Amino acid sequence: MSRRTRVLLGITIILLLAAAGFIIGYDSSKAKYKLFREHRAQFDAVKTEALLLMDSLDERSDIGNTFIYSNNAVPPFHDSMNTELQDKMRQIAAWSGDSLDFVRYSRQDGKPLLRFIFDWEREHGPTYHIVYCASQSMVEQAYAAEPVKYKLTPLADGWYGIEIE
């Protein structure tokens, strides 16, 4: 075998090993949650305003499980939502490539649970959620009650990524 052939074979082997390492080490959930990492301030702003809105509505009646945004509804926003909050949600939807399908509010043992649900129809892979709740155990409890398998990824204080399998 000539020196040139050995060098080319060595380079090919190195490239194959590098490609295999990339494929094995690739975590699709990191790519999904990139939206949250890049726009966390927007998610925090929506959370703050949505929790204030839902607290004021909860004082008047039991709101239960409320969809405050649905891209399949006309109009897509809850009736009580102001235009500033609507604009913030529209911006998150645009940054997500319009894969934001729902924003849902509920209470789990008295604690607010705010779920941003992406890719509900699995057009771009598994459905995933970005969830706010003050307690990880409450998030786990909420998803354990649903008939799905999921992978929970802590993102930041009170924020979690949920990938539905």
Image (cartoon, rainbow, N blue to C red):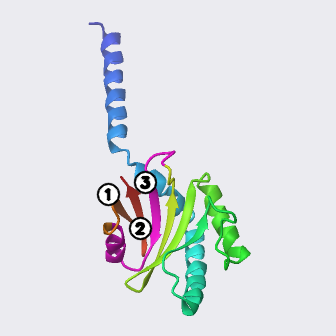
Judge from the rendering whether residue 74 lies leftward or rightward of residue 30; answer left or right: right
Mark 1 and mark 3 residues within 8 Å of each other at the beta carbon: no
Q: Of all residues shown, which one is farthest toward the left?
A: 1
According to the picture, the residue beneath numbered tag 3 turns out to be: 30
Q: Which residue is at 58% across, 55% downward?
A: 96
The number of discs equals 3
Nearer to us: label 1 or label 3:
1
Residue 155 screen position, x and y as percent: 42, 66
Q: Is residue 101 magenta?
A: no
SS class of the residue under badge 1?
Answer: loop
- Considering only order in the chain, which callout, 1 or 2, is on the residue closer to the N terminus? 1
Q: Which residue is at 35% across, 22% downward?
A: 12
According to the picture, the residue beneath numbered tag 1 turns out to be: 149
According to the picture, the residue beneath numbered tag 2 turns out to be: 160
Q: Amino acid at mark 2?
A: Tyr
What separation in Å lies between label 1 and label 3 (alpha carbons)?
Answer: 19 Å
- Considering only order in the chain, which callout, 3 or 1, is on the residue closer to the N terminus? 3
Residue 25 screen position, x and y as percent: 34, 44
Q: Is 82 situated above or below 119?
A: below
Near-viewer residue (32 or 21): 32
Quarter of the image holding residue 87?
A: bottom right
Quarter of the image holding residue 91?
A: bottom right
Q: Of all residues shown, which one is farthest toward the bottom?
A: 59
Residue 67 screen position, x and y as percent: 56, 71
Q: Dot 1, how many residues are within 10 Å of its Cα: few (below 14), some (14-19), or many (20+)? A: few
Residue 79 screen position, x and y as percent: 67, 76
Q: Which residues are magenta?
A: 122-143
Q: Which mark is residue 72?
A: none
Q: Amino acid at mark 3?
A: Lys
SS class of the residue under badge 2?
Answer: strand
Mark 2 and mark 1 residues within 8 Å of each other at the beta carbon: no
